[in-house]
Image (tube, helix red, strand yellow):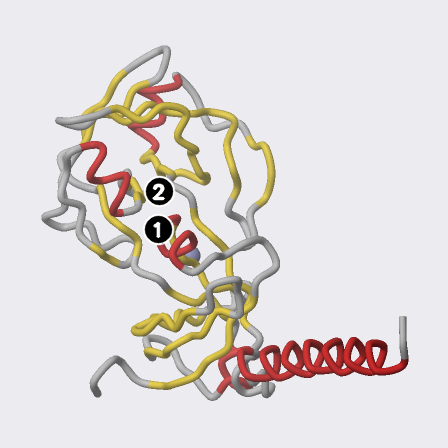
C-alpha cells in the first residue's frame, strides 16, 4: 500500500469516528440531575386480583415468586387465561398483593386481540372500562369492568420529586435514550415514599421506542401537552 492510499484510508477512518461521536452527542439526552436519569421499566400485560376473585380462581392466596421494583409488589406463581369476545390470552402474569378490585392491564394491541375497547387510564381508575373473563385450571370469574391500558407514569419518592422539582400529579415529557429515541408526552408523576424511581410504559410503547432493559429517560419538558 502506498503513502497516498494509507493517508486516504486514515482520513476515511477519522471521518467515520468523528461522525459517530457527533451522532452520539446529538442523540444523547442531557442528563442534568434535575432531569434524570429516570429508569424505564416495561409493564407487560398483567392482572391484579381482588381477594374474592383470587379465591375463586386459585382456592387460596397468591404464591410469591419475586419482588418487583415497587416495594411490596410481587410477581405471583399463578397465571390466568384472559377470555375476550374475539380472542384468548394464556399465561398472563398475576401481581400481588390482592387489591380491593380486580384490574387487567393490557396494551392496545392486547385489547384488539381480545376484542375489547380498553381505555387509557391510570391504575385504579376503572369506572366504565370493559370487563373480561379470567380463567385458571380451577375456576373462572367474570369481571364487569377493570380492563384498561395503563397510562404511562413515573413512580418517585418525595426526595426524587424534590431533586427533579416535581410534585404529585405533575405531567412531564420524557425522552427515551434507546435504539429508536422517542419523546413520551403527558407522563403522570406519582409521588410516594412507598415508591422507587421508575417510569412505567407498556409493551406497545416499549416496542415503538426500541426499549430494552437498562434504557433510561430524561425529562425534556414540564406540563401536559399543549399547556
Ligand atoms: Zn407503575
Q: Residue drawn at (34%, 79%), measured in percent from left and top? A: 170
Q: Residue furthest top?
A: 138
In screen coordinates, is 142 left or right of 96? left
Q: Which residue is mark 2?
A: 99
Secondary structure under badge 2? Answer: strand
Choose between 219 and 129: the one closer to the eye.
219
Which of the 4 quarters of the picture holds residue 82?
top left
Crowd tier of the residue under label 2, counting other residues whose Cα lies within 10 Å: few below 14, some 14–19, many 20 or above: some
Choose between 63 and 208: the one closer to the eye.
208
Choose between 45 and 75: the one closer to the eye.
45
Crowd tier of the residue under label 1, counting other residues whose Cα lies within 10 Å: few below 14, some 14–19, many 20 or above: some
Q: Residue drawn at (35%, 62%), measured in percent from left and top? A: 152
Counting from the top left corner in percent of width and height, residue 188 is at 34, 71
Confirm whether residue 195 shows in the render. no
- Give me the disc on residue 122: none
Counting from the top left corner in percent of width and height, residue 153 is at 38, 65
Q: Quadrant of the N terminus?
A: bottom right
Look at the picture and state if 166 lies above or below 74.
Answer: below
Confirm whether residue 47 shows in the render. yes
- Give me the disc on residue 204: 1
Q: Quadrant of the C terminus?
A: bottom left
For the residues labelled 2 and 1, say whether their Cβ atoms are less than 8 Å apart: no
Look at the picture and state if 88 lies above or below 93.
Answer: above
Amino acid at each position: 500500500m502506498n503513502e497516498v492510499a494509507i493517508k486516504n484510508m486514515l482520513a476515511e477512518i477519522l471521518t467515520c469516528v468523528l461522525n459517530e461521536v457527533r451522532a452520539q452527542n446529538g442523540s444523547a439526552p442531557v442528563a442534568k440531575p434535575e432531569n434524570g436519569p429516570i429508569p424505564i421499566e416495561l409493564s407487560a400485560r398483567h392482572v391484579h386480583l381482588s381477594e374474592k376473585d383470587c379465591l375463586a380462581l386459585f382456592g387460596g392466596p397468591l404464591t410469591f415468586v419475586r419482588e418487583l421494583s415497587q416495594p411490596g409488589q410481587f410477581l405471583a406463581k399463578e397465571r390466568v387465561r384472559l377470555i375476550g369476545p374475539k380472542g384468548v390470552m394464556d399465561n398472563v402474569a398475576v401481581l400481588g398483593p390482592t387489591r380491593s378490585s380486580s384490574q387487567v392491564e393490557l396494551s392496545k394491541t392486547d385489547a384488539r386481540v381480545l376484542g375489547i375497547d380498553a381505555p387509557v387510564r391510570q391504575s385504579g381508575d376503572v369506572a366504565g372500562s370493559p370487563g373480561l373473563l379470567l380463567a385458571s385450571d380451577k375456576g373462572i370469574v367474570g369481571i364487569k369492568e377493570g380492563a384498561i391500558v395503563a397510562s404511562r407514569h413515573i413512580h418517585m419518592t418525595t426526595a426524587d420529586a424534590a431533586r427533579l422539582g416535581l410534585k404529585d400529579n405533575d405531567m412531564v415529557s420524557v425522552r427515551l435514550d434507546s435504539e429508536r429515541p422517542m419523546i413520551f408526552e403527558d407522563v403522570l408523576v406519582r409521588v410516594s415514599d412507598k415508591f422507587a424511581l421508575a417510569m412505567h410504559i407498556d409493551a406497545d410503547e416499549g416496542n415503538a421506542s426500541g426499549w430494552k432493559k437498562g434504557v433510561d429517560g430524561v425529562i425534556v419538558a414540564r406540563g401536559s401537552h399543549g399547556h
